[in-house]
Image (cartoon, rainbow, N blue to C red):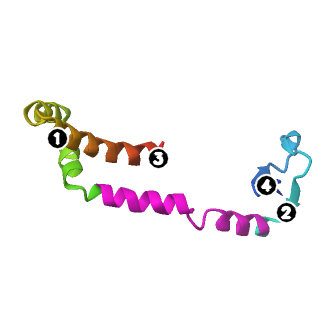
Amino acid sequence: MKRYKVPGGGLHSVPDDGSQDSTITAGMVAISEAQFQTMSETAVEAPGAADVKLAADATAARQYTKLQALINMTPAQVQAWVIANVTTLSAAQDAITTLAVAVSILGRKL
């Protein structure tokens, strides 16, 4: 396998048989297998700040009692709970807040 460093920090590999040499573009630098392995390991080593924040926020959301109750319900149970319990503006705001917490975490995972 031929290994290359791509401009901008990426890595690229092509078979030794030359079948994919056309995928090598200007700016790619040939590197050794050892360099490739070292660069591959360090490339996935540390999570970014956004990943760390998402993990902390997801943990906090899982500890949110009302969200945990919704998570443990079936769709039919959720519908029945909403009909029975979301009867005032205050209750609606509380339910929307719970759903917004879940959407904020799920949206970042898309």
Magenta stretch: residue 55 in it? yes
Residues packed near mark 2 inside 10 Å, few (<14), some (14 to 19) or many (20 plus): some
Q: Which residue is mark 3?
A: 108
Of the residues under marks 4 and 2, which one precedes in the sequence?
Answer: 4
Q: Report the mark closest to the observer, 1 or 4.
A: 1
The residues bearing labels 4 and 2 have C-alpha atoms spaced at a distance of 15 Å
The amino acid beneath tag 2 is: Ile
Considering the image in quadrants, where does the N terminus appear? bottom right
Q: Is residue 28 above or below residue 82?
A: below
Work out whether residue 75 or residue 63 is closer to the camera in this orientation and state it.
63
Q: Which residue is mark 1?
A: 90
Q: Quadrant of residue 88?
A: top left
Q: Secondary structure at mark 4?
A: loop
Q: Quadrant of residue 107?
A: top left
The amino acid beneath tag 4 is: Gly
At 28% from the left and 56% from the top, the residue drawn is: 62
At 7% from the left and 33% from the top, the residue drawn is: 84
The residues bearing labels 1 and 4 have C-alpha atoms spaced at a distance of 51 Å
Q: Report the mark closest to the observer, 4 or 2.
A: 4
Q: Secondary structure at mark 2?
A: strand
Residue 75, label in figure: none
Work out whether residue 38 or residue 94 is closer to the camera in this orientation and state it.
94
Give yes or no for contact between labels 1 and 4 (Cβ–Cβ under 8 Å). Answer: no
The amino acid beneath tag 1 is: Ser
Q: Report the mark closest to the observer, 2 or 3.
A: 3
Q: Which residue is mark 4?
A: 8
Q: Report the mark closest to the observer, 3 or 1.
A: 1
Of the residues under marks 1 and 4, which one precedes in the sequence?
Answer: 4
x, y percent for residue 40: 69, 63
Work out whether residue 32 or residue 86 is closer to the camera in this orientation and state it.
86
Of the residues under marks 2 and 3, which one precedes in the sequence?
Answer: 2
Query: Which portion, as a residue range, is magenta?
Result: 35-61
